[in-house]
Every structure is written in structure tokens, then in C-alpha cells.
Image (cartoon, grey):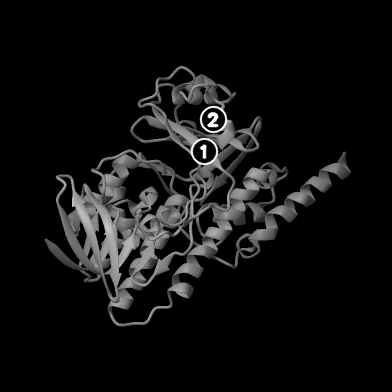
Amino acid sequence: MKEFVDVLVIGAGPSGCVSSAYLHNNGAKVKVVEKTKFPRLVVGESLIPRVMDHFHEAGLFEALDSQGFEKKLGARFMRGDEVCIFDFSNKFGEGWDWTWQVPRADFDKVLADEVIRKGVDLEFEAEVISVEFNGSDSITTVKNKNGETKEIHAKFIIDSSGYGRVLPRLLDLEKPSKLSPHSAIFSHVDDINREEGVEGTLISFDIIETEVWLWVIPFSNGKTSLGIVGPTDYIDKLSENGDTTEALRKAISLSDYYVKRFGDVDFLFEPRHLKDYSCSVKKLFGDGFALTGNASEFLDPVFSSGMAFATESGMLSAKLALRQLNGETIDWQKEYSDYILYGVNVFTTYVKEWYTGNLQELFFHQPENPDVKRKICAVLAGYVWNKKNTFVRIHDTAVKNLADFIRLEKMQQQ
């Protein structure tokens, strides 16, 4: 059996849904294949405002907004008695002032259902076995849940397969991440001790040690996501026998702030262990394909950048693929790879400086510098391509230099 389409999208997560919806809305014949069956459990439950631009442009916003997901207006970072709260409405430059905190199983199913409702051909439980590129055409062999195979002929492929990393594996495009090895363990709980008002709904990052932090992401359904992140060797030592329940329980006990709220609450599923999650690729595109989202680069969950890069790359790759289908010659290096990697490099700096402690120095410095905070807030909101923002334009030196200045100032005061 053979199918013929303009664009094949691999993966039906947020990146694949944004890509396929945009292409379909603009007249392209698109096919989506997804290895799993939805709903399925996946991490990445805290979004940032930049993703809202993409959901809106793809025509997916209204379906998501109707679900009543918990609104995320900012984020709180805690270190002992020190607290830093970022408000997305008080950031440098233009952009959305809010986003969502979501149970991804529900969120991704709403996205996929809306894409199907629009008329996109989305096939679940369809695994990509092989891909051949032949000039302007590609042949992808797909196997369904019954073991039957078929060929999908496409003029372009967008790989949004996430951690499945289909084309990176098949085409030998994987390479080590620039970031040091970190891992995470997470689960969900019924948040029976949740406080009323803002405190009960606020997403928080509680710093246990400089490189170790606990995430708390409340959902509108009364459940909350809990996760511990740190260097892989630290996470491995939380439990002597690799028991993830014991490890996450111990991690919660290390949080003076959250141990009362979550110390005795049962986990809704056995905590999942995400080991050495950072990943990278040799290139983001090739003749007839583009990589998006986690199929290309994944950094770290600390600033929730994963879905922002997924939808940014998903939308951009769809736009460029459509233009190419319409006869334009696209400079994929300049218009896609260089653009996406600029944002990746900005966030990479912030992730690295978080774990060195330099960024934490800026977060908790008193008195706050309102201008610095607004510019960092814009980065945390995902607007990492706005070079009018000093903390974007000279990201590689701004954080470290300012942290060094703060430390020097403290030493002089002492």
C-alpha cells in the first residue's frame, strides 16, 4: 500500500500538531504518523508564553483555552528563605503575558483531537521503520499496530518525534549535548493539602542545592506534578536500589517549604526516571527534511524551554516547507538552523549559568534591579530572539559579568 502527500509529519505532540495544522490550513496535503496511542504520559507540563503565539497562529488556541487549564502568570524561585517571583506581564518587550500549566496527557490529546477535527490525516500507533530520500521525494515505511507496513511518499518530512528522535537515529545525526549530565524523577499527586488562592496554584522551583531543585506544578484538576532535578550522579544516589518512589520521597523531604504539603501524599503512578535527558544533533535539516522540538535539541527543564522550541521550530519548519513546495528556494541554514540555534544558544547560556550559580545570584540579589529583572523575565517567557534585549544580545557575557559584580560588591560591603 502506498500513500502520497506533500508533507509527512512524524509525531503528534505539540510540535507536530502546530506544523500539521498550519500546513493543512494553508492547503498542503499533510499526513501525521504517531507511534503511540493518546492519551499518553509525557513530561513538559510547564509552558512559557512564547508557545501561545504558535498555538494562536496554527488555529489551535481556542480548543486549548476551552479546557480550563491552570493559567501560569509567572514563576517562583525559592532558595531557603529567599524568594524571587517573575511576573510575565512585567517583562521587556512585547509578547503574551500568560500561558498554562498542563497535564500533558490531556493537553496533547486535545491538540491531536483538534488537528483531526480540522481534517488532518493523523494515524496513531504507526511506527516509522525506515526512510529513503530520492531527490525531491522521500519514501517512509511505516508499520501499524497489526504489523502491517505501507509506504508514504512525501515531498518533505518534518520530524517532530520528540525523544523518539526518528530521523536522528536513522540518519546518524545524534551528537552529545553541550550540557553536563542531569537527570530527573517525577510523578503526580492528588494535591489534598493545597492552599487556597495564588499559593495553591503557583508554579515553584525550590532550590535544594545549587545544582539540585524540586519542581511543583499545580494543575486545574486538583493534581500537581512533582519532580526532582540534579546531576545524574546525585539523582542516582537518592535511592540505594534505584527505587524511584524512595528517591522522590527523599527529595521532597529535603524541601523545608514543601515537605508538609507533599511529604505523606501518595504518588498517582510510579515515579518516572528521565536519565541524562539533554540531547543534540549534528544538523537541524537536510535535503527534504527538518528536525523540530526534542527530535533536534533538548536542554533542561529548569526554564520550561522544551515546548517553546518545539512549537517555534514546528511552526517555522512548516512555513519554510510550504514556501519550498510553492517553488521558492529556501536557505534552510540561514532561515531555519541559524535562527533556531540562536534561541537555543541563549537558553543554553541561562541553563549553564543556573547550574554555576551565577543566575541564582541575580535572581536573589536585593534590592532588585527592575530593568534587569524585566529583561531576564522576557528570556524566561521565551522571547529569546529579541536582540533589543541586552540579556539576549550579549547573553554569553551579561549574566556572568553581572553576577561577578554582585559578588564583588558583597565582598566590599563585608
Q: Quadrant of the C terminus?
A: top right
Q: Could you classify mark 2 by the number of other residues whose Cα lies within 10 Å: few (under 14), some (14-19), or many (20 or more)?
A: many
Residue to which mark 2 is pinned = 236
Q: In this rendering, does residue 49 appear at all?
A: yes
Q: In this rendering, does residue 59 appear at all?
A: no
Q: Residue lying furthest top in this view? A: 264
x 24%, y 68%: residue: 154
Residue 216 lies left or right of residue 291; in this view the side is: right
Q: In this view of the protein, which residue sits in the foreground, 410 or 247?
A: 247
Q: Quadrant of the N terminus?
A: bottom left
Callout 1 secondary element: strand
N-term mark: 1 or 2: 1
Q: CA distance from mark 1 to mark 2?
A: 9 Å
Query: Toward which corner of the image does residue 76 lie, by quadrant?
Result: top right
Q: Is residue 302 above or below residue 397?
A: above
Amino acid type, mark 2: Asp
Amino acid type, mark 1: Ser
Q: Could you classify mark 1 by the number of other residues whose Cα lies within 10 Å: few (under 14), some (14-19), or many (20 or more)?
A: many
Q: Residue lying furthest left in this view? A: 1
x 61%, y 55%: residue: 349
Of badges 1 and 2, the one in the foreground is 2
Count how many numbered circles sit on residues in the image: 2
Q: Position of residue 403 (x, y in %)?
A: 73, 49
Residue to which mark 1 is pinned = 183
Q: Position of residue 204 (x, y in %)?
A: 52, 36
Q: Are marks 1 and 2 in contact (CB under 8 Å)?
A: yes
Q: Position of residue 81 (x, y in %)?
A: 66, 30
Residue 115 lies left or right of residue 88; in this view the side is: left
Q: Position of residue 284 (x, y in %)?
A: 44, 64
